[in-house]
Amino acid sequence: TFNGSWKIERNDNYEKFMEQMGINMVKRKLAAHDNLKIIIEQTGDKFHVKETSNFRTLEIDFTLGVTFEYSLADGTELSGSWIMEGDMMKGVFNRKDNGKQLTTTRIIQGDELIQSYNYEGVDAKRIFKRG
Ligand code: MYR
């Protein structure tokens, strides 16, 4: 289960990923140490996610398979949805500014939640621990 409180532990290739997203160096440096924490509450196919970081606090509600809007901390707007495939959450989102696709997955591995990202050929991971 994804339910619970997750704190960022480490990143893998996240700087390169943000660079591919077109995020400038100053913002990348700040974002690499954003102290991201997500609290996930799943009830059936409905999710409530509370996100807090150095940048902002926000709450997101979505239903698996249903398109919703989400803005990144720098204001970039995305539209897309999550589905569940076995034990994996799979998200497909499109940037509203250029139409390009960002894909992401979440999986629990041991005591970690691993979120993977892909944008225009660049992969990254953010790894969370409960806390
Ligand atoms: C959630 O489930 O937490 C809310 C929806 C997340 C949407 C997709 C997340 C993509 C985040 C990409 C971060 C890129 C930063 C450059």
Image: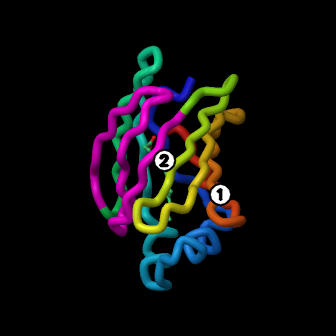
Could you tell which of marks 1 and 2 lies nearer the N-terminus? Answer: 2
Q: Residue furthest bottom?
A: 25
Q: Element type at marker 1?
A: strand
Give left or right: position of 2 versus 124.
left
Let me know if residue 78 is in the magenta part.
Answer: yes
Amino acid beneath label 2: Lys
To which quarter of the image does residue 84 belong?
A: top right
Q: Is residue 60 magenta?
A: yes
Residue that mark 2 sits on? 7
Residue 6, placed above or below residue 125: above
Magenta residues, as a range? 56-82
- Secondary structure character of the magenta stretch overall: strand
Residue at the image point whose x is 34% and y is 51% from the top: 52
Q: Which residue is at the front of the view, 97 or 55? A: 97
Q: Residue furthest front?
A: 99
Q: Is mark 2 within 8 Å of ligand 1?
A: no
Image point 64% across, 39% down: which residue?
112
Q: Where is mark 1, residue-wise?
A: 118
- Counting every numbered tag in the picture gives 2
